[in-house]
Each structure stands twice: as C-alpha cells, then as structure tokens.
Image (tube, rainbow, N blue to C red):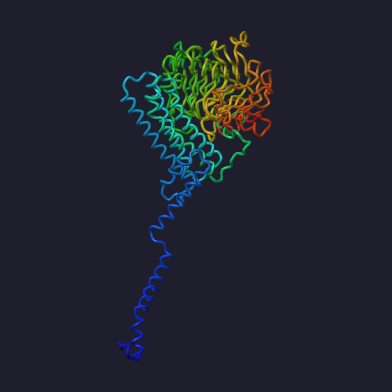
Amino acid sequence: MLPLTFFFSGSTMKNFRKIAPFLALVFVLFILGNHFTNTLKEPIPSQKHHIHVHKHIQVAKSTCQGTLYPDLCVSTLATFPNLASKSVPQIISSVVNQTVYEVKSSSYNCTSLRKKLKNLKPLEQRALDDCLKLFDDTTVELKTAIAELSKTTIGSNRYHDLQTLLSGAMTNLYTCLDGFAYTKGGKNKVRGKIEKKLLKISHHVSNSLAMLKKVPGVKKSSKSEVFPEYGKMKEGFPSWVNSKGRKLLQASVKETKFDVVVAKDGTGNFTTIGEALAAAPNSSTTRYVARFVIHIKAGAYFESVEVSRKQTNLMFVGDGIGKTVVKSNKNVVDGWTTFQSATVAIVGQGFIAKGITFENSAGPDKRQAVALRSGADFSVFYNCSFIGYQDTLYVHSLRQFYRECDIYGTVDFIFGNAAVVFQNCNLYARKPNESQKNLFTAQGREDPNQNTGISILNCKVAAAADLIPVKSSFKSYLGRPWKLYSRTVFLKSYIEDLVDPTGWLEWNGTFALDTLYYGEYMNKGPGSNISGRVAWPGYRVIKNFTEASQFTVGQFIQGNDWLNSTGVPFFANLN
C-alpha cells in the first residue's frame, strides 16, 4: 500500500491530520446510522413479544364482548396459546374444558368436606350429596358440549343442543347451592366453603353461552323471538319423539308390547318399580337406541324411584290416572333437600310416562315436597297427574313436554329451570295453609342467555275441589320470579276467577321485576282480564303473533326433532 504522502503535499498532509479525528467520527456515525435503520426495519425479540401480547389481548377482548363477566372472560382467554388462530367454537371449547377441570376440583372439595366436617346435620349431608350428583351430571353435559363444538359445522339444531347443555350445567351448579337454603348455620359452615368457586364456574358457563352467539353460520333469533329452543312439531308432537314412540303413546295398554311388568299382586315380573328399574338396561347416550317399556299395573306403589342418567329411553306405562299411583312423603321439614324429596326423579334422556299418577303425600305443613323431578332431556309426560302441595312438579332442567296432564298444588307448584311446554293440561290450585297464597309457577332462570322457561299453552287454570268452597279466602297468582331472569308465559289458556287481578306476585320487593320475562297472550276466562295486571318492566301483554309463536313446542323445545317418536299427540304452533 502506498503512503498518504504519495497523494498529498506536505501542507495538505498537515491539514488532513487536523481533520482526521472528525472524519473518523463521521465514519462511526455513518456505520451506527445504518445499523439503527436496519434495527427499525426488523424489531428485536422483546418488541415482537410485545406486539404479539397486544394482539392476543385484543382478540380476547373482542371475543368476550357481550359476556356478563368480561374480566373473567378476558383473563381466561388470555391464558390460551395461539388465540388469534382459533375459531369461536375452539375458544368456547377451551373455556368449557377448563370448566370441567374446575368442576372436578369442586367435587373433590365436597367429598373432602363430607369427611372432614364433623357433626354435619342430615340436611347438610344430603345437600353435599346433591352437589356430588349434580357435579357428575354437569361434567357429562360439559363433555358432551365439547364433543359438539368439535364438529365441522354448527347448524341451528346443534346450536340449540349446545344452549341446552350449557344451560343445564349452570342450573346444576345453582341447584347445589340451593340445597343449603334451609340449613341453620349451614351457609357459613358448608355453603360458604364452596360458593365462591361454584359461582366462578357458573360464570365460565355464562360466558360460554354468550360467546356461543358469535358462532358464524347459525341463524340467530330476532329480538321478538323469545323461545326458539323447543323445536318444530310433527303430527302433534315435538319432532324429537320418533314414530315408534308416537305409536307407543297412542296405543292402548292391551295393544302395547312390554319388556317387563310390575304388579302389586304378584302377577307381573316384579312387585316394585325399583326392582324393574334394576333389571332395565343401561343404554348408550344416543336417544335412538331401542326403547325399554315397563308396564306398571294398577295399584298404589309406596316407593321412591330414580331413573338414572345411564337409563335412557325408558317408558313407564300405567293403567291410567288414579289407577296406577306412585307416592312417597319425603319433604324439607323432615330433613330432605327439595331436590331429594321427589317421589320420582328422572335423569335418563328420552324418558316417557303415560297413564300414571305421581304423588307426594307429605301435606301442606311439610313445605317443599316434590312429586316428580325431571332433569331428563327430551322427556315426555302424557295423560299423567302430579299431586302435592308446595313444589309439586320440579321441571329441573333440559327440554320437556307435558300433554293432557293434571297438576295439583299450592305454593310454587310448577317450578324449575327447564325449557318446558305444557299443552292441553289442567293446573289446579288446592287449599293452602291459612297464611299461604297459591302460586302456579316459580321459574328459575339464572342467566339471560339460558334457553329456559315455562310455556303454558291451551291449558286450564282453575281451583281444585277443596279450594272452590273457600277460594275467596285465599289469593292465587300465575307466578312469581324465583330467580333473576325468570321467564313464564300463558298462551291461549282459560283462566278462572281465582287468579288475582294483578296476575303476578313479587318474590321479594323489587327483585327481578326489571329482568324477568312474564307474558300473556290471548287468554280467556274471568281471570284473564289484563286491565289490572302488574306494571313491572319485565311484564308484557304479548300482541305480536310472531313473538307468541316462539313459546310453542315447535320453536321452544325443537319439538319436531324428537316428539314424533313418542306417539304423544301435540300441536307445533299456537293452534
């Protein structure tokens, strides 16, 4: 390399030496400038992470819009990896999967409390037993929902199934807590140890129900459509009743082929219903397996009966109302929870009963005493009667249909949180205790996104024989709000003069008066005059045919999808 003096003179060389440090600084700045520019073009790893986290949170917030518990929703979704790449069903599935884990944790906690807490009263022990059973049901419903969410498409039928499963799961959690309502000091001792966790789980389910509305491709109901969940009708029955079921319900006892016969006099296979149930098969979860038919001959059967979740598609056929009678007398005063007081409890999907009287004979002084409790999806009761006083018929959860049935009671005698339609039934108020009022319904919807409610269509609302002579001494009401979003309608029914002109009664002060949905549509009779009805924000006189139609068998419980198979006559619409 040639020396610099070869290119420059001596004086120039002196000047160059003076400015050399400056040139070196310029060169260094030039290099740094290029590096800085390249750095701006390609973020460093920490900046990449910040951008990813920001997008992750934005997806969580967007998905959680419209939920009742957005903080819980966002914090839950933020823990899921690759959130931006997940579909809405996949996100809901992740939430439900986490909820299953928390339900199992609560079940373990209740089992531990059952062992650790000494001197528990019988009612507290039974309330914990209720919780364990309800947690098992909840786990099954949530796992079924996860399986449904994994399907390639979610059409209207699957959408309503998911609503039903999630609504039922939430109802189970609140039923667990309700079991401690009458335990003295029990709320602090036991309920207080499980309530916070159960409320968090129910809020997860609530958020999942709200997010379900964001699933693309599902036809959503308009604001005027109140009860689209029951389903379409076919030949007078919800379509979930198939042709074989319809034939069984429409056939006479002599024409019906039975798998087993129960008879008090020993002329059948068994003398008790419990023995017959023990011999019945445990079916798979599908509702299309063969139906197992049990004939219960005329007689009074004093026993408590439970059809378990695994016993699907069972049918009880009696010899008629008042002839085949199943009764017991469990009640809250004697130490049973309302849930366990039921004479007959049904959980197995696809259950049908025909021509039977279900009774709880505890009497009016024993408070809550349930004749029948149903938490069975696609359950049907045809030509049956339900007799009790307070809390006679517990329509606990999922989709149910009652046709040409008689229901007798006093306080809240049709109650629960199913999606249920009563069609061509008789509702009879009995003589209550001196300090009591008659209330035909007490619906228990906890969340505005639950697809539940009581629809009473083309029924008669009347006084029973023991009330008629003294009906002026007792006030009777169509219903009161048991829970915050209580939902009940009376459609095209005949209402006798025993119903107070106000129609409805508060539960406690202003509780639920602006969140409930109570409606009346084209009713007749002296008790149907709406001029003196309550002026609550949640009460309305339904004037729109489209709105009223959402309470029918066809739309409310997807009846056309399952009732045809039962053989029970039904009409799909308002007529």
Camera-nearest residue between 119 and 320: 119
Measuring from the top left, give residue 568's x and y in whole percent.
Answer: 58, 25
Q: Is residue 2 shown left or right of residue 555?
A: left
Q: Residue 3 appears at what percent x and percent y?
A: 30, 88
Quadrant for residue 136, please give it: top left
Q: Residue at x 39, y 27 (%)?
A: 192
Quarter placement of the N terminus = bottom left
Q: Residue at image x 40%, y 55%?
A: 49
The spot of residue 322 in percent (x, y) is 54, 13
Q: Quadrant of residue 283?
A: top left
Query: How many marks do you count on the picture?
Result: 0
Q: Quadrant of residue 243?
A: top right
64 or 107: nearer the viewer: 64
Tell me if 504 is positioned left or right of 347 in this view: right
Q: Which image quarter is the C terminus in?
A: top right
Q: Residue furthest top?
A: 469
Q: Residue at x 37, y 29 (%)?
A: 193
Q: Can you give x and y, in whole percent of width and height, for residue 206 in the image?
A: 49, 36
